[in-house]
Image (cartoon, rainbow, N blue to C red):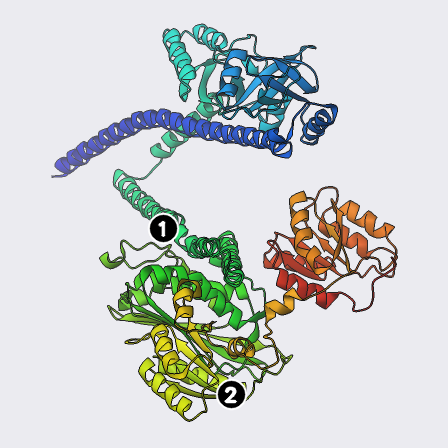
Amino acid sequence: MNKKIIRFLWVSFIGLLALCIGVFSAITSFMVRQNNAALNRVVDTYMEGMSTQIQRHFETMVDMRLIQVGGIVQAIPPESVTTLDQTTRERFERAAAYRGFIHLALYSIEGEAEVLYGEDVTVEDKEIFLADMNNGDKLVTLGTTAGGETMLLYGISVGYPNDVGYPMSGGQRCTALVVGLPIDQINNALSLGVDSTLIFTHIIRADGTFVVENADIASDNCYDWIRENGRNYGLEDIDDTMAELRQAVEARTEFSMVVSIGGEAGHVYCVPLPNTEWTMVTVMPRGVLDEALATLGNQRVWTALAGCSIIMLAMLAIFLVYFRFSRQQKAEHANRAKSEFLSNMSHDIRTPMNAIVGMTAIATKNIDKPDQVKDCLRKITLSSRHLLGLINDVLDMSKIESGKLTLDMELISLREVMDGIVSIVQPQISAKKQVFDIFIQDIREERVYCDGVRLNQVLINLLSNALKFTPAGGQIHVTLSQEPSPKGEGYIRTHFLVEDTGIGMSPEFQSRIFESFVREDNKRVHKIEGSGLGMAITKYIVDAMDGTIEVQSELNKGSQFHVTLDLERFEEREEEMLLPAWDILVVDDDERLCISAADALQEIGLRADWTLDGSSAIEMAERRHAEARDYHIVLLDWQMPGMDGIETARRMREKIGEDVPILIISAYDWGSIEAEARAAGVSGFLSKPLFKSTLYYGLSRFKEGAEAKNEADQEAGADYTGRRLLVAEDNELNWEIARELLAPYGFELTWAENGRICLEKFQASEPGWYDAVLMDLRMPMMDGYEATRAIRACDRPDADIPIIAMTADAFSEDIQRCIQCGMNAHAAKPLDMRELLRTLQGLMSPTANGPG
């Protein structure tokens, strides 16, 4: 029995030993193959990544230089040059020198060159160069000066296809404008020699000769150098490999191969360079990786010899595979979700773009109607601001996801916010033929402190979802109301309610709606675009504002989002809004709007009656007319069931005559119905929502002996004659924009091209000469921060002059940094003239200007 057990144990031991040896041998053989495969994959991936990075860097450098050449053509248009006189030559010379070029020449169709700047240059492959230039293409090639210096040439066609090139001394027109730079700029710009111990990068021509040689190679031809190394290493198929390499270079395709380099295996990767006839060749010796992988293999062998049993290794392998698979699935899910977000982001951007394009088309169509064009431009401005806010939000996405969202609290008008929302969503509402309305209830404070961009984003996100998931003919309502805040008298609790009659949501999805990249996986929404990120961002913003957001939804019946914010009141009281005790008739099919409008009208001193349909309105107006006490003004909703506002106005005119003003009230665009409405006897238009200020300014124009006043008129009437501004701006186009926007208000502007010049002009002026400084932040020589500190450090009585940052750096941390360095305020580009003028008025001294 014992012998049987011992025999069994020995047999089992030998069997297990044989199994271990077999398994170990199989694993070792497998790992050797895997090591070689991994080495090739690693090298391929690394070489492809390095080459792609350098290729893109080269492409970026070439594109930048070609843009600069195009800039010369834009600065000196061919049609503006009638003769190549000395003045024109000097302009070309200055334009080339300003952009860092050392050579500039014009070439005729036949290839005759006329050098305007720098030395004469002989162009390499002149036939190819002329063919590309005469065909209107762009090209990068080489040239050689009389002194033997190699020069990098950038050529751009200026005579194709309309034969309007620059005139040349011989009487012909040029076909191309060519500039030159030292060839060393390729090496410097691409950093080809960063690590010459591991990787070499060369640039060659189609015949294998070097354009840039990034190593000490004892050959003038790359093909010969690789072939010679391969033969010395004993590669029998090197000639076939080189033939494939030549074919790939001529066909301008990528190519990868392994050959002997310096006595050891090396990886060669070739990729064509754009806008040239050249190819980039990257070479990496494999010795370092071979040694590292060999060491890794030995470690695995010794680890396997001292390892656990096959079962434990199998269990561990299964666990590792499962863990890796799980992590890979999670990473793939996150990447897929983010990819979908990027591909669907176009929807959020198209929302304000639709408004911009639509309002531009309306303005163009009605160019002879100044009031309507002005209204379109106002809506374009509002939509542009929202688009800018969207771009800022995309750039700020990482901060939002990490919970580091910052707010920029500023004084805003709820009326302006809601007007902007209406302007943005109008085109889509009209396109889908949906019913849209905004209701105002108990608004006590129109002006509050809030992050206007973020609030706008919250409302647009909610309305975008309502628009997407509500079918044609469905209803979308926004209700704005206020009540006392539990935070005290300094705050007002403001409610934003967005309701729709769309497809609704399942209870399961409602619990996950505020997660990032989440959309309901349902056939009902598969054809509806969306990023899946809007609700998550909305929740982040509302939480950052210490507010709440709630959702109620039912499948196939619609959804309701309720945002509650406690906003700080604006303490300064506005001018008293009172009108004569007129009798007003409000007609709208929604009882809530009628009650709200009647309350607002009573607050500004008017008496208001209301009714819910056109027939009743006609009867009420006719009865008052018969009693010789007509309503002073009638407010008619445009879209009402049965008899709409225009038909009601037409019939009402027949009953009461032309004396009573009739105004259409609507959240839709006035331009699309104006002609029909005017023909029916309508006197004008008021845009919903009907805030108290909207009603006051809209009805003031009917006040006897007085003209209507509104904020736009007040802004247009601002006069700053004699006020002097010092504008520090390194971009000439931005300077022109600032000058054109500010000069009509009477400002005298002085330009400083950078921070140092700004400081020098301020120091050279008499104290009190300038009223304020508009300071760009990113400038050469001295940036805006340094210039501000230097001005503040001046020993002058006006060293505390108002300095306003005027920059595209518009995040909250940028504003805080401006204030910390001594600036008084911040104005983001593109400029909001209303805010900039308000800032200047608040900062500039009311006393007269300084000397002069």
Q: Is residue 798 left or right of residue 48?
A: right
Q: Which residue is drawn at the image coordinates 60% and 75% (left, top)?
A: 707
Q: Earlier in the sequence, mark 2 or mark 1?
A: 1
**Badge 1 local density, few (<14 within 10 Å), some, or many (20+)?**
some
Residue 367, how many percent across, how many down? Answer: 50, 55
For residue 816, above or below residue 615: above
Residue 517 visible in the picture:
yes
Residue 149 or residue 689, whichever sits in front: 689
Compared with 339, 487 (above or below) is below
Quarter of the image that includes the N terminus: top left
Quarter of the image with the C terminus is: bottom right
Tag shown at residue 337: 1
Find residue 211 and name its label. Answer: none
State the image quarter where residue 791 is shown.
bottom right
Q: Is residue 123 above or below residue 832?
A: above
Residue 703 found in image quarter:
bottom right
Question: What amino acid type is highlighted by mark number 2?
Answer: Trp
Q: Quadrant of residue 537?
A: bottom left
* Residue 543 visible here: no
10 Å crowding of disc 2: few (<14), some (14-19), many (20+): some
Number of on-image labels: 2
Front of the two marks 2 and 1: 2
- Give me the residue at 74% from left, 58% from top: 747
Q: Position of residue 308 (x, y in %)?
A: 31, 39
Residue corresponding to mark 2: 582
Amino acid type shown at disc 1: Ala
Residue 338 picture location, percent across and down: 39, 49
Q: Residue furthest bottom?
A: 627
Residue 85 percent coordinates (x, y):
72, 23
At mark 1, the secondary structure is helix
